[in-house]
């Protein structure tokens, strides 16, 4: 493989030095070694204390639990072990680690006491015993929300955007969110009561977790119902006839090996599009023949005009902003230099802009091949995320980000939102969040399909995923002034849930390791933990979702790749954890040491 092909995945965008550390993979490996060691010590200590009698029914630090409740599982103990080991492995000094650890553990204590106190009050006031496992589950969910809050407080992250947020979430969007949610809760309850034998069988064969069918059914039914609304809305929006002039910007760094295919595909799409298309290739400090190959491809095009630009500031965002400075067309499509768009991609995408409220539109980024493990798991991942969850979010205007591999944007809205953010991961998501905060809708149309490269090696996969998973926090920091605010559904609901989901994903592999320790060594201490719900969390529920989505999207071949996809979810958890450990945390001075500025002022 040519050197340029091997290296084109990595650039100055991979790990912005101001907000991330270039740490070796051994850091996360050391995390798991420490996690196992501390987990064994904590579980052994709890076992000895339970055997001697002091703990009694409080062996998961459940202070006010139902007496004699044997459904206990070590949820809170896991969180304590995870928080301790995570804090100790941050790339900063001891004082910052101690502060992060103190905030995480103090928060967990407050959450647990609050949940247990509410359970006690319910028991005293209404004589209703709250199952201890429910107390544990609620405290775990709240702890998942606590985790990103502490990271956002302590990590060095991008400053909030300065563009005023003028949008207001419509009543219609809230109704399209709440109606499917209520319907999903009701349907889940009906299924749980009317199909109890089926639910029991699903639990026994490890396809359903041990916390009841409600959580799984409500979540997936909601996505299905909201997705149905999304399909209808996307279809209605696509009926419009709209073909304005379009500028296409292709930033290109060491892309000589594939940019000709990208331009040829764009030329075919321009031929199927009624409006004019102008291509701007922005060559960005390449060390190969990107410029010459791109110029030859432009000259060979018959359906579009083209201009080759040269941006000497490294980075995709500077290249995009440089290209935008040369654009006069009212709509802009940004395409990665390794993306091959479908013939109808421009036509189907641009029709949505007949609605003046639409700010950005994306499509479905299918992998170019399915020959390798990485290709196949990416194929299933795209179907689940972009063909299922993104369509659902489109149903209630909750799109957080449209992949920059192919994004169409209204230029007037982009000018209003400001330039593409430089020096962060996730600049494509950031611009969509800013458009949403200004009141514009972002949507995804799965009919606009395009093919993209997937990593050729584990090193490339690691680089890609660290960049993607860090972007959640980079974007959240940039948008922290609108988090949980009603300027858009993305800021009020979806991005906050995305932070919680990032915490859940980082804990998935450690949860499996901890469960194996409990089941293999300490099962007499924790009677409530069984192998079925553990397997269901890791394999059962994700497998059901992936299989259903594959058939819904009429891609049954993807079912063959589901086993590999399930294994990849653990790899993804590993990379998510590594991404969090690669965030930059500035050293913290001890309390008695004044800051340099303060010492200078004293002098």
Image (spheres, rainbow, N blue to C red):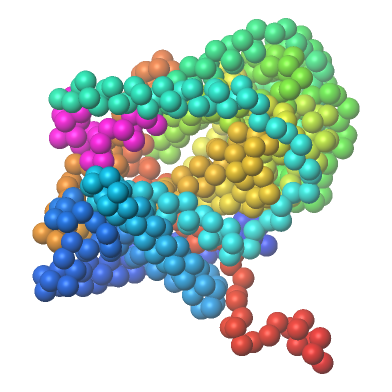
**Residue 223 seen in the figure:** no
Q: Is residue 425 left or right of residue 331?
A: left
- Residue at 27%, 59% in the rendered image: 64
Q: Residue at x 65, y 50 (%)?
A: 480
Q: Position of residue 78 (x, y in %)?
A: 31, 60
Residues drawn in magenta: 198-219
Residue 212 sits inside the magenta stretch: yes
Q: Quadrant of the C terminus?
A: bottom right
Closer to the camera in the image, 529 or 90: 529
The answer to if 597 sits in the magenta stretch is: no
Residue 524 can be seen, yes or no: yes
| Viewer-proximal residue among 383 and 131 | 131
Residue 265: percent from left, percent from top: 66, 21
Q: Residue at x 55, y 23 (%)?
A: 175
Residue name at image x 60 percent, y 75 percent: 587
Picture coordinates of residue 23 (x, y %)? Answer: 52, 65
- Please state if 66 lies on the left or on the right of 596 as rendered: left
């Amino acid at each position: 493989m040519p050197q340029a092909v091997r290296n084109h995945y990595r650039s100055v965008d991979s790990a912005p030095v101001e907000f991330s550390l270039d740490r070796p993979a051994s850091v996360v490996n050391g995390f798991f070694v420490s996690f196992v060691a501390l987990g064994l010590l904590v579980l052994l200590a709890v076992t000895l204390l339970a055997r001697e009698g002091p703990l009694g029914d409080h062996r998961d630090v459940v202070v006010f639990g139902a007496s004699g409740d044997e459904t206990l599982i070590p949820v809170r103990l896991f969180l304590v072990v995870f928080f301790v080991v995570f804090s100790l492995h941050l790339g900063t000094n001891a004082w910052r680690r101690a502060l992060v650890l103190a905030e995480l553990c103090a928060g967990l204590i407050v959450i647990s006491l609050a949940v247990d106190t509410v359970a006690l009050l319910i028991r005293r006031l209404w004589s209703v015993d709250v199952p201890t496992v429910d107390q544990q589950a609620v405290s775990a969910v709240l702890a998942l929300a606590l985790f990103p809050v502490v990271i956002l407080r302590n990590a060095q992250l991008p400053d909030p955007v300065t563009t005023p947020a003028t949008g207001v979430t419509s009543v219609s969007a809230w109704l399209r969110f709440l109606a499917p949610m209520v319907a999903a809760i009701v349907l889940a309850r009906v299924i749980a009561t009317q199909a109890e034998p089926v639910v029991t069988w699903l639990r026994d064969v490890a396809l359903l977790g041990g916390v009841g069918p409600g959580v799984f059914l409500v979540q997936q039914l909601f996505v299905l119902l909201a997705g149905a609304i999304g399909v209808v809305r996307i279809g209605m929006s696509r009926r419009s006839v709209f073909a304005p002039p379009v500028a296409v910007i292709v930033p290109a760094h060491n892309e000589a090996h594939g940019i000709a295919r990208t331009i040829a595909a764009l030329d075919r799409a321009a031929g199927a599009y009624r409006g004019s298309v102008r291509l701007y290739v922005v060559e960005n400090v390449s060390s190969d023949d990107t410029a010459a190959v791109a110029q030859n491809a432009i000259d060979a095009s018959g359906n579009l005009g083209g201009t080759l630009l040269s941006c000497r500031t490294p980075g995709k965002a500077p290249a995009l902003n440089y290209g935008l400075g040369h654009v006069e067309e009212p709509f802009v499509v940004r395409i990665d230099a390794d993306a091959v768009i479908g013939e109808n991609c421009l036509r189907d995408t641009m029709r949505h802009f007949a609605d003046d409220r639409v700010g950005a539109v994306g499509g479905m980024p299918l992998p170019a091949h399915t020959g390798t493990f990485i290709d196949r798991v990416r194929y299933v991942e795209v179907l689940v995320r972009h063909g299922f969850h993104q369509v659902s979010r489109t149903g209630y205007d909750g799109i957080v980000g449209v992949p920059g591999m192919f994004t169409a944007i209204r230029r007037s809205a982009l000018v209003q939102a400001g330039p593409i953010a430089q020096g962060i991961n996730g600049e494509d998501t950031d611009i969509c969040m800013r458009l949403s905060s200004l009141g514009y809708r972002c949507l995804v149309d799965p009919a606009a399909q395009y093919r993209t490269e997937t990593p050729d090696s584990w090193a490339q996969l690691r680089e890609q995923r660290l960049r993607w998973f860090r972007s959640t926090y980079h974007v959240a920091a940039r948008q922290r002034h609108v988090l949980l605010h009603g300027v858009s559904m993305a800021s009020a609901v979806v991005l906050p849930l995305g932070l919680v989901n990032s915490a859940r994903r980082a804990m998935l592999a450690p949860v499996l390791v901890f469960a194996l320790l409990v089941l293999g060594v300490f099962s007499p201490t924790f009677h409530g933990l069984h192998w079925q719900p553990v397997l269901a969390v890791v394999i059962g529920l994700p497998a059901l979702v992936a299989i259903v989505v594959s058939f819904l999207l009429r891609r049954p071949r993807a079912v063959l790749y589901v086993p590999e996809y399930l294994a990849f979810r653990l790899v993804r958890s590993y990379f998510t954890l590594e991404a969090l450990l690669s965030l930059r945390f500035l050293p913290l001075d001890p309390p008695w040491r004044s800051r340099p500025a303060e010492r200078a002022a004293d002098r």
